[in-house]
Amino acid sequence: MISRENNPSFVNPFLDYSITILNKSPNSVKEYNYDINNFLKYMMVHLKITKETDYEKIDVSSFSVEDLKKITLEDIHSYISHLAIDNRSKATTRARKISTLRIFFKYLATKEKILDVNPAQDLETPKLEKRMPKYLSLEQSQKLLKVSDDENNRNYKRDFAITTLFLNCGLRLSELVGININDIDFDENKMTVIGKGNKERVIYLNKSCINAIKDYLSSRPSPSLIKRDSKSSDKALFLSEQKRRISNRTVQLIITKELKLAGLGSKNLSVHKLRHTAATLMYQYGNVDIRALQELLGHQSISTTEIYTHVSNEQVRDAIERNPLNH
């Protein structure tokens, strides 16, 4: 993580603006800080503000407003080219960094009015290839649930509840980790989660989820043993063995271990792929309306949800076989 203490004077107000006005999450603002620092380091070399060529050693704190005013669209294009050629960054990574620069320069030009001209105004996003999301089949999902419900694992009730929520609700990792017990309404069988941009949404829980959560709660440590800390561990649904709110990393390790036990560890799968799995299975087997799926997943744009309207190769093959002209 890059410290804000070494930022130029014009960067931190933008980060604060992103949290307070744009309502960006702390994780998004960390990414903004990282992207801007990398960009400024490149500019210091590109504009010959420093003789240092080792990017790790470049100190951007001296980057001035006058230096900022020298940046043109061509300079930004040079940076994007550097990302693609020297860093071999994927188009999705470059697109994210371009988005950061667009927002950053717009802020400097229109809000702070530091710049008379916004050099990123006509900055375009690279064309992204549409890739089908990787996901587990129904049989693979059932196998994953089976290996997570293993009594030889002392945390099996917790781990089974985590896997059940991922596969049934399509939660993001940060959403699952952030769940508090009082976010769950057992009378109405629903749960409130905080998604991207600190947006709150309601997720309705099926019997599998309710049963898994209740079973886990029956084995959860006594409240007197749970740590009271800055992460509100005493309110958290899922706890680590240290009696603190479970971390992103611990959840990732749990899912990675389960995937290996289920014989799925070689398929380049991850926690996020379980979100894809939940969405795909609901669409393919549950006859779920695409708008309902958008609401469930917390997608801002329907186009993001539409990646789940693909059909499997088996369905395509079956359609060909069913052609009445087939003999």
Image: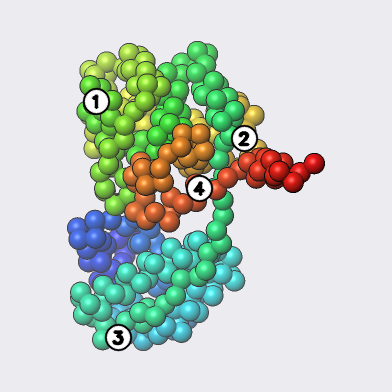
Determine contact: label 2, label 1, CB under 8 Å.
no
Quarter occupied by residue 238: top left
How far apart marks 4 and 3 lie (CA) works out to 42 Å
Dot in front, 1 or 3: 1
Dot in front, 1 or 4: 4
Residue 296 drawn at (x, y percent): 35, 41
- Residue sitting nearer the eye, 154 or 290: 290
Residue 205 drawn at (x, y percent): 34, 28
Residue 253 vs 6, above or below: the answer is above
Residue 18 vs 266, above or below: the answer is below
N-terminal of the two: label 4 or label 3? Answer: 3
- Residue sitting nearer the eye, 313 or 257: 313
Q: Name the residue under label 4.
A: 309
Q: Mark 2 points at which residue?
A: 265
Determine contact: label 1, label 3, CB under 8 Å.
no
Q: Mark 3 points at which residue?
A: 117
Residue 297 lies left or right of residue 313; in this view the side is: left
Determine contact: label 1, label 4, CB under 8 Å.
no
Residue 198 lies left or right of residue 285; in this view the side is: left
Q: Residues within 10 Å of mark 2 (few under 14, many from 20)?
A: some
Residue 184 drawn at (x, y percent): 26, 28
Q: Residue furthest front?
A: 324
Residue visible at 62% across and 33% down? 264
Q: Mark 3 belongs to which amino acid?
A: Val
N-terminal of the two: label 2 or label 4? Answer: 2
Q: Mark 1 belongs to which amino acid?
A: Glu
How far apart marks 2 and 4 lie (CA) works out to 26 Å
Residue 237 lies left or right of residue 146; in this view the side is: left
Q: Is mark 2 on a helix, strand or loop?
A: loop
